[in-house]
Amino acid sequence: ETGVTQSPTHLIKTRGQQVTLRCSSQSGHNTVSWYQQALGQGPQFIFQYYREEENGRGNFPPRFSGLQFPNYSSELNVNALELDDSALYLCASSPRISSGSVNEQFFGPGTRLTVL
Amino acid sequence: SQQGEEDPQALSIQEGENATMNCSYKTSINNLQWYRQNSGRGLVHLILIRSNEREKHSGRLRVTLDTSKKSSSLLITASRAADTASYFCATASANQAGTALIFGKGTTLSVSS
């Protein structure tokens, strides 16, 4: 088990609502990435934060936004929820960015979001 | 978008048998990683192989990488019921520094006793 925690574990929202998911990174890790995993699929990269700034973004609309705090914990915010946003949201932390590579990621247990 | 494609999608074996999963990818990579996921929960890192390596071992795991064919394989020897899980390959692009891992769709492994 990694030292990455996520809250809440499960969440049910209705279409159009907004949601905030939280992640505490493993001690000593300053980089946090968020992934969306639809049922039966692999995780898809949403974005990454390094030292409180967005450091890369996948193919997700602007209604997906995030924050990283000075203690390196992070939030994922999703506005105007759609049915297709129903998924497992995974947060992963890593010690630092190595130039030219992404090394081992330490994943949290995920937040299961259901949009009705 | 998914970079890697795992094959097979599902695999059922008996305890003690070996399990082999394959992964193909599309673009140049810096490294390739394998992860395990139990019952739709968090992913656990298994092994990382760099683009200049051809084979790597970790306990009962053996990973190979063929960059000319853009493919990798994960071999689990002497499988146990506890190995039942989904296995994903993930690539770190050589063209994009320090950001995303690109995952495949995974192979679901069932090991029965």
Image (tube, coloured by chain):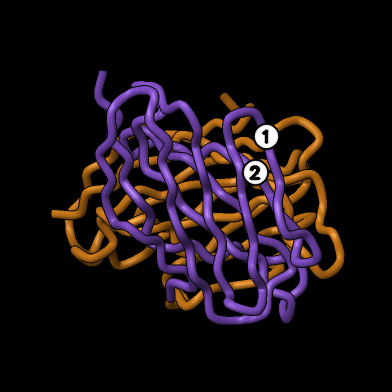
Q: Are marks 2 and 1 in contact (CB under 8 Å)?
A: yes
Report the side of A14 relative to B81 (left or right).
left
Q: Crowding near pointer 2: few (<14 within 10 Å), some, many (20+)?
A: some
Q: Residue at x 44, y 74 (%)?
A: A60
Determine whether A26 is above or below A65 in the image.
above
Q: Crowding near pointer 1: few (<14 within 10 Å), some, many (20+)?
A: few
Q: Is mark 1 on a helix, strand or loop?
A: strand
Q: Residue B18 carries which label?
A: none
User: In the rendering, at what x and y percent does residue A2 appear?
Assistant: 61, 28
User: In the rendering, at what x and y percent does residue A59 appear?
Assistant: 47, 78
Determine whether B102 is above or below B15 in the image.
below
Say which residue label 1 marks: B58
Kind of residue at disc 2: Ile
The CA span between labels 2 and 1 is 7 Å
What is the chain letter for disc 1?
A: B
Q: Which mark is residue B47?
A: 2
The chain coloured purple carries which letter? B
Q: Residue at x 49, y 37 (%)?
A: B76
Hey, which quadrant is residue B69 in on the image?
A: bottom right
Frontmost residue, A11 versus A91 = A91
Kind of residue at disc 1: Ser
Between discs 2 and 1, the one toward the N terminus: 2
Chain A appears in which tint?
Answer: orange
Determine whether B58 is above or below B99 in the image.
above
Frontmost residue, A31 versus B31 = B31
User: In the rendering, at what x and y percent does residue B107 appear?
Assistant: 35, 51
Hey, which quadrant is residue A26 in on the image?
A: top right
What is the chain letter for disc 2?
A: B
